[in-house]
Image (cartoon, rainbow, N blue to C red):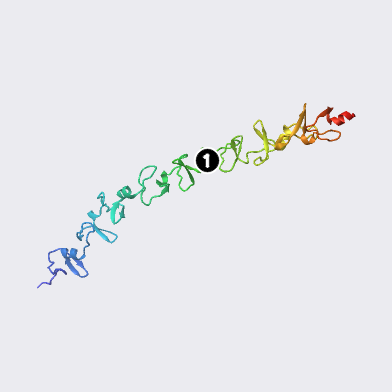
Amino acid sequence: MSESFDCAKCSESLYGRKYIQTDDGPYCVPCYDNTFANTCAECQQLIGHDSRELFYEDRHFHEGCFRCCRCQRSLADEPFTCQDGELLCNDCYCSAFSSQCSACGEPVMPGSRKLEYGGQTWHEHCFLCSGCEQPLGSRSFVPDKGAHYCVPCYENKFAPRCARCSKTLTQGGVTYRDQPWHRECLVCTGCQTPLAGQQFTSRDDDPYCVACFGELFAPKCSSCKRPITGLGGGKYVSFEDRHWHHSCFSCARCSTSLVGQGFVPDGDQVLCQGCSQAGP
């Protein structure tokens, strides 16, 4: 008698039949599939030994059942995402869950580099300066009425410009003749001394410190020969082509102040009426 060669499960003879050998012995194909095959998570049918089986997160699928739950595209050789237990191709996932780029309108793919600001999202390469149109990336920027500018473009477009050097004022500055100036640009036309925070005046629109203006343009006191600027509340007296500081306008003989008093010119001098009447 010939030796028996039976299925380890159903004990039917395997002579002349296809079988699969395991460590527990040979199995006919039906018994092998019923015993060892996994159940497809999609169709709930056994995945036979001769079928291509796909595995994802403790779930098994027939190759034909491993599909996008929305468009039914096969995911066997495609990138995909699992959302709430459902498999989605990248296109369907982006359409349903990804934000849209505010610049180009295309989906921002999962894992791609992006920028978010003010409730909007951009691809990194789409977030551009509205001035130079270069990517802003991680650089500082200034929003303005829906536009976004890198700092140099914003300053060139909107920041005030110094009346002297024409460069932008990014901070500080002073106003002279209703125009903005850098503090370091507002200097005396004569000696180049900074004028910001100092008392100064101007001639022909050019600024001068008090000292330079007095030396260059102010009349000189006929008594002390120093400039009469009239700045800082200083008062002076003029007679014909001569000028005096209030404190210098006094009788040449008795030194009595002549401010608000009658006086008599005597050559290059002025005398009070008493000294004039007293004679030489």
Q: Is residue 230 above or below residue 77?
A: above
Q: Is residue 32 left or right of residue 233?
A: left
Q: Is residue 221 above or below residue 48?
A: above
Pick whichever, 193 or 72, lies toward us.
Answer: 193
Quadrant housing the N terminus = bottom left
Q: Amino acid at mark 1?
A: Glu
Q: Secondary structure at mark 1?
A: helix
The image position of residue 200, as x and y in percent, is 68, 37
Residue farthest to the bottom?
A: 1
Q: Residues within 10 Å of mark 1 (few under 14, many from 20)?
A: some
Residue 215, by quadrant, is top right
Q: Is residue 222 left or right of residue 199?
A: right
Q: Is residue 159 left or right of residue 265?
A: left
Pick whichever, 17 or 116, lies toward us.
Answer: 116
The image position of residue 59, as x and y in percent, is 26, 60
The image position of residue 147, as x and y in percent, is 45, 41
- Give the residue at mark 1: 155
